[in-house]
Image (cartoon, rainbow, N blue to C red):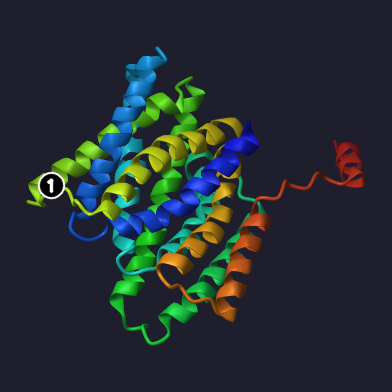
């Protein structure tokens, strides 16, 4: 089951980045995100009702649901949608592939988990790779505040995503399924975005362009209902660090889509950068080495 969930997550989320790009234009980003998660929450609620699963969360879950709605289904996507205005979708996926590293850091800060040396080494490789991938894009644009802002927003969105991972992991330890928690967290995130957009006077008109409508449905149902449920099931089954390792393959799928739809041009530094990002993530999340028998014996002798 785990391999199936893993492949499903990679294929769906590796292609959502280009769909986000198709959402930009007539409809303001907060409104598009609200539409996406209202649709997704409605579908999930229908699934819960038809399968006769629990629909109403227990009282102790609401603080976590509120936090997850804000982090994972509000701030996270605001950052990525606005970053897509300046940065090619494939490169945003590359930044997002650092999620396992942020999970390790946040796990240390909030859960007291130790950070292994190879994780730090992987982080340095990954950051170097991101630098190489962005180098061709930045040539002649170092004074372009939009490109730099887009990169910063993509990094911030990845941090919010990591926080949402840890919250989901916590709720699953309480016995709550991602079907239930996603329903309410998506509804909370969408409602906050909708209220904010309404307060700012943003129009709620729906773009009738077939590309917009198709990408909205793709993001709402495969991208949100199926993708998030599959991913968060992995979080509960194998832990947030190992589940986030699936993001390593997102750039391969996303950059391929970006090449076809956005005219992304590959270069030698870009190939080298992608290799470093992948190598860094692989290094960071290889299983920890067991102590050598001699070392263990030595420690036992000192006890």
Q: Residue at x 47, y 56 (%)?
A: 96
Where does the N terminus fall, quadrant-wise? top right
> Does residue 68 appear left or right of residue 227 in this picture?
left
- The residue sitting at 47% across, 59% down in the picture is 93
Name the foreground residue: 239 vs 88.
88
Give the class, few, some or many, for how many residues have Cα within 10 Å of label 1's Cα (few <14, many ≥20). some
Q: Which residue is mark 1?
A: 204
Q: Is residue 126 above or below residue 221?
A: below
Q: Is residue 205 above or below residue 253?
A: above
How many labels, in total?
A: 1
- Relative side of 237 to 43, left or right: right
| Position in image of residue 116 (x %, y %) | 65, 51
| Image quadrant where residue 279 sits | bottom right
Quarter of the image with the C terminus in it: top right
Seen in the image, is 175 located left or right of residue 82? right
- Kindly identify the residue that appears in the image at 80 percent across and 44 percent down: 290
Image coordinates of residue 153 in percent, x first then y, are: 34, 61
In this view of the protein, can residue 113 be seen by the observer? no
Q: Residue at x 51, y 24 (%)?
A: 173
Question: Residue 299 appears at what percent x and percent y?
Answer: 86, 41
């Amino acid at each position: 089951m785990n391999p199936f969930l893993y492949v499903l997550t990679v294929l769906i989320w590796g292609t959502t980045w280009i769909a986000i790009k198709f959402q930009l234009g007539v409809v303001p980003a907060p409104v598009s995100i609200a539409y996406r998660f209202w649709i997704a929450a409605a579908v999930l609620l229908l699934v819960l009702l038809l399968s006769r699963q629990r629909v109403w969360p227990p009282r102790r879950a609401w603080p976590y649901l509120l936090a997850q709605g804000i982090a994972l289904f509000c701030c996270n996507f605001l950052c990525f949608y606005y970053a897509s205005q300046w940065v090619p979708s494939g490169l945003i996926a590359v930044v997002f592939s650092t999620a396992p590293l942020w999970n390790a850091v946040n796990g240390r800060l909030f859960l007291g988990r130790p950070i292994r040396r190879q994780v730090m080494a992987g982080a340095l490789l990954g950051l170097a790779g991101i630098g190489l991938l962005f180098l061709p894009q930045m040539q002649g644009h170092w004074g372009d505040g939009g490109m730099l802002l887009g990169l910063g927003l993509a990094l911030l969105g990845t941090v919010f995503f990591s926080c949402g991972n840890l919250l989901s992991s916590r709720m699953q330890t309480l016995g709550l399924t991602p079907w239930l928690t996603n329903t309410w967290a998506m509804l909370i995130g969408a409602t906050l975005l909708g209220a904010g957009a309404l307060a700012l006077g943003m129009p709620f008109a729906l773009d009738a362009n077939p590309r917009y409508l198709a990408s909205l449905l793709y993001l709402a149902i495969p991208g949100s209902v199926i993708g998030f449920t599959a991913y968060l099931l992995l979080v509960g089954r194998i832990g947030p660090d190992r589940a986030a390792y699936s993001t390593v393959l997102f750039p391969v799928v996303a950059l391929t889509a970006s090449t076809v739809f956005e005219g992304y041009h590959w270069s030698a530094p870009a190939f080298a950068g992608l290799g470093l990002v992948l190598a860094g993530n692989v290094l960071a999340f290889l299983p920890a080495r067991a102590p050598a028998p001699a070392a263990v014996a030595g420690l036992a002798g000192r006890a």
